[in-house]
Amino acid sequence: MTHPSDSRAYFFKIDTTIKKIRNALQKQFNDAGFDLTVDQWVVLDHIARNPGISQNLLADLTAKDAPTVTRIIDLLAKKSLVERRMAEDDRRKFLIYPTKNGQQKYSEMLPTVAAIRRKGWGNLNEDDYHHFVRIMDSIYNNFND
């Protein structure tokens, strides 16, 4: 007996949807002259909302590997949007903070991100959101072996 998902490539639907959203968001960033990629925004977003976050936690929250997060932080630091500070309790560990410019850039970009989120959500309601999150969490957790 076959399972309903055998002939339904739900992962392809998820992947193509993510790509569509990322492309729309990047186009908005480019059109507005924000000079950030979507990946850089994702990292900046987490840093702005969690000042003093560790790189390891940042990697976990963004679902990116450590070298990728380090590279993105380097780019954001070069743009004077974030800074690394040595942790007081562990001199081998650095914590990441937004700079004043970084906080300003975050505030400037957030309405554009919110508008794309609203566009994507369209006329779906709160119940739709809860079903969506439940389904996505279930699929995600099915791969936590």
Image (cartoon, rainbow, N blue to C red):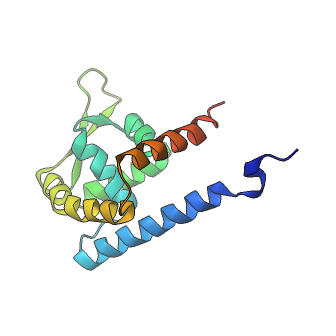
With respect to residue 20, does 124 lie above or below? above
Q: Residue 14: x and y, percent?
A: 56, 57
Residue at coordinates 28% horizontally, 50% vertically from top-left? 45
Count of marks, rendered view: 0
Q: Residue 77: x and y, percent?
A: 26, 54
The one nearer the camera, 12 or 47, is 12
Res. 91 image quadrant: top left
Q: Residue 120: x and y, percent?
A: 38, 63
Res. 117 image quadrant: bottom left
Task: Report the residue that reaches farthest toward the bottom.
Answer: 31
With respect to residue 67, does 28 lie above or below? below
Figure quadrant of the N terminus: top right
Residue at coordinates 75% horizontally, 49% vertically from top-left? 4
The one nearer the camera, 38 or 76, is 38
Q: Is residue 40 visible?
A: yes
Q: Residue 93: x and y, percent?
A: 34, 31
The one nearer the camera, 114 or 38, is 114
Left or right: where 100 falls relative to 77: left
Figure quadrant of the C terminus: top right
Left or right: where 63 falls relative to 118: right
Left or right: where 138 falls relative to 54: right
Left or right: where 44 falls relative to 121: left
